[in-house]
Image (cartoon, helix red, strand yellow):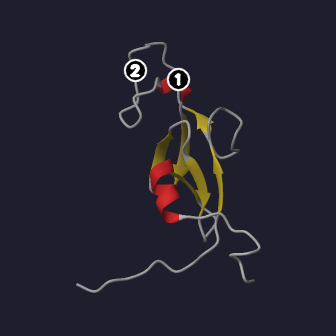
Amino acid sequence: MKKYRKKPVVIEAQQWFKEGDHEEVTMYPPNDDPADNCEYCEMWMGDHGRISTLEGGHIVCPGDWIIKSVKGEYYPCKPDIFEATYEEVTERNNPA
């Protein structure tokens, strides 16, 4: 099997915590059942958002990053994956 490295691409991203944090995220349909917790983060689903992507709708947990892809689509990314994959662009590390 061959090995590949992800090309260095600058992306736009914003962390989502609550309604209004990102224009592409809508609130998850309300449910008054306090036992209705997220399978990913175990927090109550009423505090979650939803985003439409090319692959369909995705749950957005508080703290997830919303990434704008190189083609302009938005999708969620878990904080641990985001931290392992991306670093903030600064003048020092952006030779453009």
Label pair 2/1, CB-CB below 8 angstroms = yes
SS at badge 1? helix
Residue 71 at x, y percent in the picture: 61, 70
Query: Would you identify the image quadrant in which residue 19 lies?
Result: top right
Q: Nearer the viewer, residue 52 or 87?
A: 87
Residue 60 at x, y percent in the picture: 52, 41
Residue 23 at x, y percent in the picture: 70, 44
Residue 13 at x, y percent in the picture: 64, 56
Which quadrant is the N terminus positioned in?
A: bottom left
Q: Amino acid at mark 2?
A: Asp
Residue 78 visible in the snapshot: no
Residue at left offset 38%, top offset 37%: 40
Q: Which mark is residue 14?
A: none
Q: Residues within 10 Å of mark 1 (few under 14, many from 20)?
A: some
Residue 72 placement, left or right of 62: right
89 over 14 or under it: above or below: below
Distance in Å between CA atoms under marks 2 and 1: 8 Å
Q: Which mark is residue 36?
A: 2
Residue at left offset 56%, top offset 40%: 63
87 over 35 or under it: above or below: below
Q: Amino acid at mark 1?
A: Gly
Residue at left offset 41%, top offset 34%: 41
Residue at left offset 65%, top offset 46%: 24
4 over 69 or under it: above or below: below
Q: Nearer the viewer, residue 37 or 26?
A: 37
Which quadrant is the C terminus positioned in?
A: bottom right
Q: Which residue is mark 1?
A: 46
Q: Residues within 10 Å of mark 2 (few under 14, many from 20)?
A: few
Residue 48 placement, left or right of 11: left
Sequence-earlier tag: 2 or 1? 2
Q: Nearer the viewer, residue 40 or 87?
A: 87
SS at badge 2? loop
